[in-house]
Amino acid sequence: MRVMTESTILIVEDDPIVRLVTEKQIAMLGDFKTEAVSTAEAAIARFPDNICLIFMDIGLPGMDGLYATLQIRELEKQNGHKRVPIIALTGHGDRNKCIAAGMDDYLQKPTLLADIKRMLQKHLVVS
């Protein structure tokens, strides 16, 4: 699988082990550029600079992933940005709440390599 190299997959996860595992899973699937941040605030500050997809933890400290998604969707509207797919990563979330907040899909933690692959194939133009 390939995606344009100037585009970045953003991983928003406060647990350093989960961040590392997710980055490694994505790397195993192809030549993807990733960046990881540990807070929703950092994700919003980073958006939309060449972000092609976001894996967003829901249970972040401070601002949670659901509220961060609402903020990102508002930024997209205000600035005319293309909608970036946001995939929920959660060990205890409610799929319906994630979708209602503007997320495009949902993965239960711990994620399997096949789950990450399916999300990349579904939400990115890959070959």
Image (tube, rainbow, N blue to C red):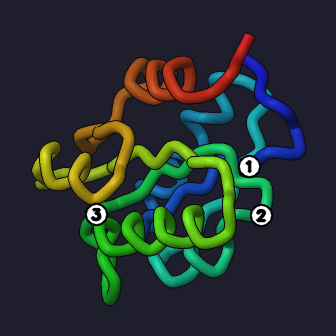
Residue 12, how many percent across, how many down?
A: 49, 63
Which quarter of the rendered picture does the C terminus lie within?
Answer: top right
Q: Position of residue 71 (x, y in %)?
A: 44, 74
Is residue 72 placed above or below 102 in the rendered structure? below
Looking at the image, which is closer to me, 13 or 56? 56
Q: Is residue 3 left or right of residue 76?
A: right
The residue carrying pointer 3 sits among few (fewer than 14), some (14 to 19) or many (20 or more) residues within 10 Å by Cα, namely many
Which residue appears at 47% of the width and 78% of the height? 39
Q: CA distance from mark 1 to mark 2?
A: 8 Å
Q: Give the secondary structure at mark 1.
A: strand
Q: Amino acid at mark 1?
A: Thr
Cα–Cα gap, marks 2 and 3: 22 Å
Query: Which residue carries the number 3 mark?
Result: 58
**The one of 94 and 104 positioned closer to us in this rendering:** 104
Q: Is there CB contact under 8 Å for labels 1 and 2? A: yes
The residue identified by callout 1 is 8
Upstream in sequence: badge 2 or badge 3 = 2
Residue 93 in the image: x percent, y percent? 14, 54
Indicate the amino acid at tag 2. Asp
| Image disc number at residue 49 | 2
The reply, left or right, for residue 62 in relation to residue 26 is left
The mark that comes first in sequence, 1 or 3, is 1
Q: Circle 3 sits in a helix, a strand or a loop, which is it?
A: loop
Instruction: Identify the residue at horizontal 77%, vertical 21% (top origin).
Output: 2
